[in-house]
Amino acid sequence: MAQWTSAVGAAQLARLLNSQQDRPAGAATRRPPAYRALADGIRLLVLEGRVPVAARLPAERELALSLSVSRTTVAAAYEALRAEGFLESRRGAGSWTAVPAGNPLPARGLEPLPPETLGSMIDLGCAALPAPEPWLTRAVQGALEELPPYAHTHGDYPAGLPALRAMIAERYTARGIPTMPEQIMVTTGAMGAIDAICHLFGGRGERIAVESPSYANILQLMREAGARLVPVAMAEGLTGWDMDRWRQVLRDAAPRIAYVVADFHNPTGALADEDQRRRLVEAARSAGTVLVADETMTELWLDEVSMPRPVCAFDPAGSTVVTVGSASKAFWAGMRIGWVRAAPDVIRSLVAARAYADLGTPVLEQLAVNWLFSTGGWEHAVELRRGQARENRDALVAAVRKELPSWEFEVPQGGLTLWVRAGGLSGSRLAEVGERVGVRVPSGPRFGVDGAFEGYVRLPFTVGGAVAEEAAARLAAAARVVENGGASGGGESPRTFVA
């Protein structure tokens, strides 16, 4: 197996290193030697995911020319990184980034909270809101009214209920992408859809290109499927994808699948523009890569924003772009209905393979979603969801800025998450101490590949008002413990909070 999966050019690495000079500096300290400063800069780029793990670095002479330093300086920096475990090398193969054995690696999903913590723990581990009533109740009542004819059948619809498939196809057509029901398969949530796609296209050992950072649960799903993840760093700010990096990875690593969230990316909230979408589809088509576009956040715009056309608009036949949608984020996480839009032959293959997986999606929930789509209830429910998420976002942003002014983030225009650089603190330690002081947050490494993003946490827009203020206060308490290098020792217990 090759030791590296992507490459970073000398000019690109120099640009990334130079951009660090614009970051806020800490207290004045003695300036380190040039080689040490270079090594520290590369290490920080790896830990923040801006240079992926297993990325081949430029040769010493090339980087020295781009940085206008001596080759000796670069050689000494590379040697320091090797000694610290952040670089591996082999004669004839070059040098590639790594993480040391003791660095925190991505963890499995957060365990369910024990019953005794309910009412005292503020749970920011899940980016999901309560159901938008009364629309959930109305949808279930409408589904029950439509159920009798289906109850007289076997109830097994591997591709999904014909009525719901037709309705989803109509909704894509209304968005400007002509779609037939034969291009739709209904799944058990978006996770079920992506699991089926990975098993169809990405056998064990296949490379899958993913945004870095990316949605933690999807990364874990792919790891457990035996995929080799190739991370592609996001562009700076909330500007979407770095197309130079994407073209390089698609050309050099030749991944079988690429997974992206174009609309209000999870966890950063970035929105890819239309030109990026067009160019990524073209690059994926040229590389023979199946581009999986996750649209679960598409309808969760929170500010006035001109939405770009969907990724599948640049491949309406669905031969290159396989689109995944879901009711779980825009409506309610308990409504486990998702769907796939692709070419009819891809859908047929997915449906055939399903016989050895989950067989089909619950009929009653499909009828509920179909009721929402056909009656206009979906639009009313999603508007309620946007309003709630908007209020929560604004409250959380204000609270974090007040309690933790050194933490850095950009406010997204949509989605459900805030991606926060935690003032130089360890996200893993913050998550550990946070649970002891009554707030649960997922640490940054869960959203990266091989230990990146240790200095980040993800904060979802799931609480607002006084609860958001209390959550930020508890995070500040956790941060003080981490800053002091100690543990709470049980002295700080979470206050019971009643919303």
Image (spheres, rainbow, N blue to C red):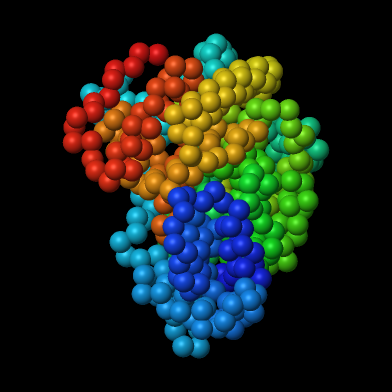
Measured from the top left, where is residue 89 in percent x and y?
Answer: 44, 80
Viewer-side residue, 184 vs 86? 86
Q: Is residue 193 above or below residue 54?
A: above
Viewer-side residue, 232 vs 204? 232
Side (left or right) of 32 relative to 232? left
Q: Quadrant of residue 268?
A: top right
Side (left or right) of 358 relative to 276? left
Identify which residue is drawn at 54% across, 54% down.
212
Quadrant (top left/top right/bottom left/bottom right) for the C terminus: top left
Q: Residue furthest bottom?
A: 92
Viewer-side residue, 458 vs 397? 397
Identify which residue is drawn at 73% across, 51% down.
277
Measured from the top left, where is residue 363 in percent x and y?
Answer: 52, 28
Measured from the top left, where is residue 464 in percent x and y?
Answer: 49, 20
Viewer-side residue, 306 vs 404? 404
Quadrant (top left/top right/bottom left/bottom right) for the N terminus: bottom left
Does residue 31 appear anywhere in the picture? yes
